[in-house]
Image (cartoon, rainbow, N blue to C red):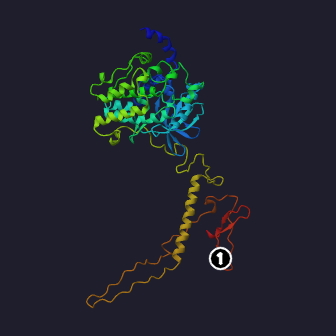
Amino acid sequence: MTIAREYTGVLERRVKRMLDPGQSAGLERRISGGSSGDADDPTLDHARGRVGQTLRGKWRLDALLGVGGMAAVYAATHRNGSRAAVKMLHPEMSVHQTVRERFLLEGYVANTVGHAGAVRVLDDDSAEDGSLFLVTELLDGETLEERRQRVGGHMPEGEVLLCADQLLDVLCAAHARGIIHRDLKPENVMLTRAGQVKVLDFGIARLRELSSKKSLTQTGVVMGTPAYMAPEYARGHADQVDERTDLWACGAMMFHLLSGEDVHHGTTVNEQLMSAMTTPAPPLASVVGDVTAATAALVDRALAFDRRNRWSDARGMQTAVRSAYERLSGKPIALAPRLAIDPAVPDRTLPRAPADVLGRAAGTPTTGEPVAMTRLRWPPGWSRRKASLGAAAAGAVVVALAVGALAARPAPARRLPAVQSAPPAAPAQPVATASLPPLQTTEALPAPPEVSVTDLPLVREEKKSAPAATTTAGKPDCHPPYVVDAETGKKHWKVDCL
C-alpha cells in the first residue's frame, strides 16, 4: 500500500499523456463490426469522412483500416496505380510539435532497422489541412491478436514459438542499430499471407543517439500499452529503458497468446499501469497448464521483474525459443512448416480503385509526376457526337475506296498443280482451285456515300479544302489527294478526290 500511495499522484499526470490502448482497440472493433456508439465518436467519424479524399493529388484513401488514439490507417492507391497504407495523424494531434516530431521520426527509424520484418516507410508529407501522414507497405494478413481471437482465445504453443522466432530476429537487427521499439504488443505484429511476421509502428521507438540530447524521450513521460510495459518503463525511468525492455514485452506477448490473459490485470488504464510498476508477472505454468517446461522457463525469464535477471539480448532469447520448439516438435525450427492464414480470413486490402474513380482516363500512362496528355480539339460548334459521326463517315469513304481499288485490279493468275494421268478405270477428277470469282463491282459494291467536307473531323472551318488540280484529260489530279498549307504546314484534302 505504501508503494501504491507513492505512485498514485504520478499516475494521474502520466495517463493523460499516453495512448489509451482501450480506445484504440475499441475503435478498431467498431470499424469492422459496427456499434451503436459510432455516432458519439467524433474521431472515428472524422477518420471515416476522409475516405475518398486524395492527398496532395497523389494518394486516394480507399478504405479505413483502423483508428488509434493518435492516428488512422487507410488503404490507399497512388495516381500511378501502386497500393500502400497511409497513416494519418488526427488533426488535433498534428498541432502538437512534439507529436509531429515523433510521428516523422517513425519513418526514419523504421527504415533504419534494415530488416524485411520491419514495415518500410515509403514517404511522408502533410495533407492539405496540415495533418501529417506516412506512406507504408500495405500488408495483407492478420495481426497476432486477431489470430488469437480467431482460433479460440489462445494460439497453439508451436505457432507462438514460430512467431516469436521471427519477431526476435527483427529485434536483433533493430537492437544492433540502437533502436528500441518500446510498444511491442500483439496488435503491432502482423502475420502476412506469405507466412512472414512484420513488426508495425516504430512511432515511439527510441534511438540511442537521442538519449544524450534534449530529445523526444524525456524522463517521466510514458507512452505505450500498460499490459506490455516492463516495470522500469511503466515508472517512467527512460534512462533504464533498453533492449531488455523489448524482451519483457516479447515475453508478455507470448504469455498473452498462450493463455489469452494479460500479465497485468486491471479494469482501468491506471490499475494496469500500477500493476506494471509494482507487481511481478505470474509464472506462465500457473496460468497455462499444458505448456512445456522449456517454453514456460524462457517466458518467465523474459518477464523477470528485475531486468538484470532477464535475457541479456534478443539473440540469446531467440536461441532458447528455437530449442523449445525442437523439444516440442522433435525437429529443428528450420524444418518447421510455414505459418499459414485461413483462406476464410478476408483480404485486408481492397482491389485497386478503378481509373475513372481516380479522375483519370483508363490506360493513361503515369509517372511520379503528372503527364500532360494531348487532347483532340474539335472545330467551333462541334459536339463529340458529331465528331464521332464524322469520323465514321470518313472511315466508310476510305474503306469504299480501298475495296474499289482492289476490285479494279485484275486477279492474279494462279498456277494450278499438274494433274497426273489416272488409270482408264478411274479417270482423274478435276482439281478444285482456291481462287475466288471476280468481284462484281457494278452490283456488289454500293456507291460511296456523299460526305460533306464540313462533316469530317479535325478540319477547321476557316480552312476550306482546296480544289483538286485538273490534268489535261479533265480529270482531277489526286496524286497526292491533298495540298499542304504553306503557313501552317497542315494537309488539306482535295474535294474532288474524296
Q: Position of residue 326 (x, y in %)?
A: 31, 37
Q: Residue at x 73, y 64 (%)?
A: 486
User: Which residue sits furthest left?
Assistant: 425
Quadrant in which residue 333 is drawn: top left
Q: Is residue 268 above or below residue 492?
A: above
Q: Is residue 35 above or below residue 118?
A: above
Give the side of residue 40 with respect to residue 387, left or right: left
Give the side of residue 252 with respect to residue 121, left or right: left
Front residue of this view, candidates 86 and 45? 86
Q: Residue at x 55, y 33 (%)?
A: 133
The C terminus: image quadrant: bottom right
Q: Is residue 153 visible?
A: no
Q: Position of residue 165 (x, y in %)?
A: 38, 35
Q: Position of residue 413 (x, y in %)?
A: 47, 82
| Amino acid type, mark 1 | Lys
User: Which residue sits furthest bottom?
Assistant: 424
Q: Secondary structure at mark 1?
A: loop
The N terminus: image quadrant: top left
Number of numbered discs:
1
Front residue of this view, candidates 224 and 124? 224
- Neighbourhood count class around disc 1 (C-alpha, 10 Å): few under 14, some 14–19, many 20 upward: few
Q: Is residue 35 above or below residue 52?
A: above
Q: Which residue is mark 1?
A: 475
Front residue of this view, candidates 377 and 64? 64
Q: Is residue 481 visible?
A: yes
Q: Position of residue 109 (x, y in %)?
A: 53, 34
